[in-house]
Amino acid sequence: MKAIKNWAPEDRPRERLLANGAATLSTAELLAILIGSGVPGKSAVDIMRTILSDYGDSLMSLAKASVQELMRYEGIGEAKAVTIVAACQLANQRLKEDLPKRMRISSSADTFEYFKHKMQDLPIEECHLLLLDQGMAVKGSALLSRGGIAGASVDVRCLLREAILGQAVAVVLCHNHPSGRTNPSREDDNLTKRAAEACQAVGIRLVDHVIFAGNDYYSYQENGKI
């Protein structure tokens, strides 16, 4: 396999981008531009095609890869692995910018839409609190905890502090299951109960507790458990 520099000009990713625009390039070609070079016998495009194939040709799946996992591929050192991870994170950041600043939450589907780009690809469990005003418009959000693959503990006192400091009238509790299973655990049920009781005591409404699992979710409100 020829190195990219020996390809015909019309086949080189950089030249094609300059001539025809970034939209004409495949995901592998775009990432190949970022990593810059391949190894003897494999171009940067070949390497990125292999990596993407192993992650189901999905940037969302690739975003879950760690630097150490990517460094297992021939031709991918620490610097290139960091570049790939950063590119995936930039894609996530770009998607977040598309969210309306004052999005209103009228259903669990709205909550999922608001948080999915932040939570659906996380390799570890995180718990966030969505802060809402009287009209159910989003005031902001707060990270309550970050844990391992098995779970993240949440201090209800921290939840109340974030809600009060954010002057929230209502809140939605959100966390992810890296396992991909939507079913709530006993710990999830206990947290929901404690959070609802604590919020009620200070005049704040716990609207829902949404569990994210990849492209799916579980809503306590929809299932009649709040």
Image: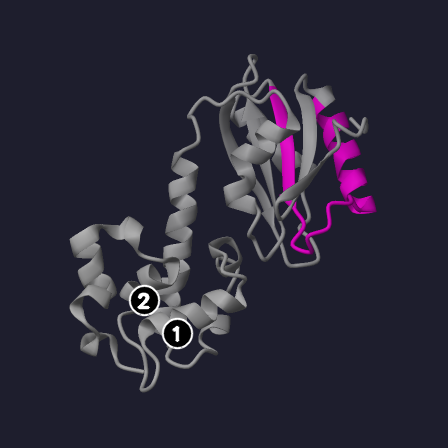
List x then y, in percent, for residue 9. 16, 68
Crowding around mark 2 (Cα neighbors within 10 Å: few <14, some 14 to 19, many 20+) is many
Q: Is residue 157 visible?
A: yes
Callout 1 touching callout 2 (CB < 8 Å) = yes
In the image, farthest residue toward the top: 135
The residue type indicated by label 1 comes to: Ile
Q: Give the camera-side residue of 167 and 122.
A: 122
List x then y, in percent, for residue 29. 33, 63
Q: Is residue 66 visible?
A: no
Q: Give the camera-side residue of 133 and 96.
A: 96
Q: Is residue 188 left or right of residue 174?
A: right
Identified at 48% across, 78% down, the residue is 72
- Residues at marks 1 and 2, CA–CA distance in whole angstroms: 8 Å
Q: Which residue is mark 2?
A: 32
115 lies above or below 225: below
In the image, farthest residue toward the bottom: 40
Q: Which residue is mark 1?
A: 47
Q: Is residue 22 left or right of residue 120?
A: left
Crowding around mark 1 (Cα neighbors within 10 Å: few <14, some 14 to 19, many 20+) is many
The residue type indicated by label 2 comes to: Ala
Q: Which residues are magenta?
A: 170-199
Residue 139 in the magenta stretch? The answer is: no
Residue 172 in the magenta stretch? The answer is: yes
